[in-house]
Amino acid sequence: MPHTILILGAAGRDFHLFNLLYRHRDDVRVAAFTATQIPDIDNRTYPAALAGPLYPDGISIRAERDLGLLVRDLGVDEVVFGYSDVSHEEVMHLASRALAAGADFRLVAPTRTMLRSRLPVLSVCAVRTGCGKSPTTLHLCQLLLQRGLRPVVVRHPMPYGDLTRQRCQRFTELEDLDRQQCTLEEREEYEPLLEAGITVFAGVDYGEVLTAAEGEGGELILWDGGNNDTPFFATDLHIVLLDPLRVGHERSYHPGETNLRLAEVALVQKSDQATAEQLAVVEAAAQELAPGAVLLRAALTVTADQPERIRGKRVLVIEDGPTLTHGGMAYGAGVVAARQLGAAEVVDPCSHTVGSLREACERYRHIRQALPALGYGPRQMADLQTTVRQTDCDLVLAATPIDLRRLLDVPQPILRVRYRYADRGEPTLAQVLERHLPRLLRRKEGE
């Protein structure tokens, strides 16, 4: 009888694990995937077009809350963990549930699922969601462009729609986001890169994604990590971000600690917002867990459109959704800008929420200063628009990486707030890149 497996996931690494390790094995049967973290991604099917000939009916995607029942009802021998940004404690709770139901529990080494590219690969990953990967990735792209090198960005997966259509996605212009019906969360990751002239790839089948990215004509591939997951590609320079505002998380989240232990560059982001004690603790952890890594400090500088309009106003702040929800942050760039620029009041966002936004405020009790920009589907986008419309405020500070004015029809004026990467002391990220570029480019030339 085939060895029966259940893969725990969140529409990302779980599919990658299946594609690389199990899709073509006739001695293994993947009975189901589970889904969590992201709304409305369960009760779907991983389609036969992606699952392959051994799965003519595809593979069902079930809710993680039914883990014990699924193990028993499906005759599962082994539960494989396949998602990210989870505390070590939560991983072991899941393991305990699997073991109690009668199944083994497995974590797969990142190197077993890293595809090898013929191009040099840089990766930007982190120990937690919300460390500042996106502005760091954008800064790296700009550094490479300044040196006459064209990077191609491959983003960690976010396949929340039609999985067959999202098998391999290529984005070169903003209109591609509309054509591929991207969620707000996808737009947040892709839009700043597209505005900078960078081509972005993502999808479900990362073998196909890698082949397409390699054929784009760039000199390097830049892996833009999601959540705090490890890269899907073997990397030639692994940059890992730490967050001194969440001291201790670098040791207590999976696979963030793994990322840090693999780091060649440990970059302490938000160093301008942290105390000397916070910086000392986080940097000591980096030196202990990644003793061979180069240690850098960086900051995320906040800029706002028409900053003079903020002083004395009652503002509603909208921040990046995942950073506030399972990322655990209470605020981001929008609240920082409101404080720095003299807003009279940051309006409590939870008193006017509806639907899925109300559910988020009830579940994540730390959310009281900013509204998470949740937009995983039409229902959440409608809830976001209704919430903003009925909030009594003078203006909205939108601190997501995208222009929400394109997506929301609200009476209040919306001002954009942005994070930008900034070095803090030496070595700078540019200096580290210069040190490694000759080696990276020699690999591209096959030396």
Image (tube, rainbow, N blue to C red):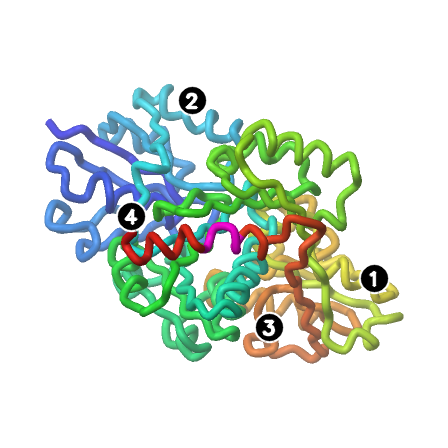
The crowding category of the residue bearing disc 3, from other C-alpha atoms within 10 Å (few below 14, some 14 to 19, many at least 20), is: some
- Return the disc, 1 or 2, that comes first in the chain's sequence: 2
What's the amino acid at mark 3? Leu
Q: Quadrant of the N terminus?
A: top left
Circle 3 is placed at which residue position? 404
| Magenta residue span | 433-437
Q: Nearer the viewer, residue 113 or 102?
A: 113
Circle 4 is placed at which residue position? 116
> Distance of mark 2 from mark 3, alpha carbons?
42 Å
Residue 431 falls in image quadrant: bottom right
What's the amino acid at mark 4? Arg
Classified by dominant secondary structure, the portion drawn in magenta counts as helix
Q: Position of residue 75 (x, y in %)?
A: 22, 28
What's the amino acid at mark 1? Gln
- Return the disc, 2 or 3, that comes first in the chain's sequence: 2
Q: Report helix, strand or loop for mark 1.
A: helix
- Compared across the picture, whether 46 is left or right of 353 comes to left
Do residues under tags 3 and 4 come within 8 Å of each other at their CB atoms?
A: no
Do residues under tags 2 and 3 come within 8 Å of each other at their CB atoms?
A: no
**Residue under the point 32% across and 63% down:** 213
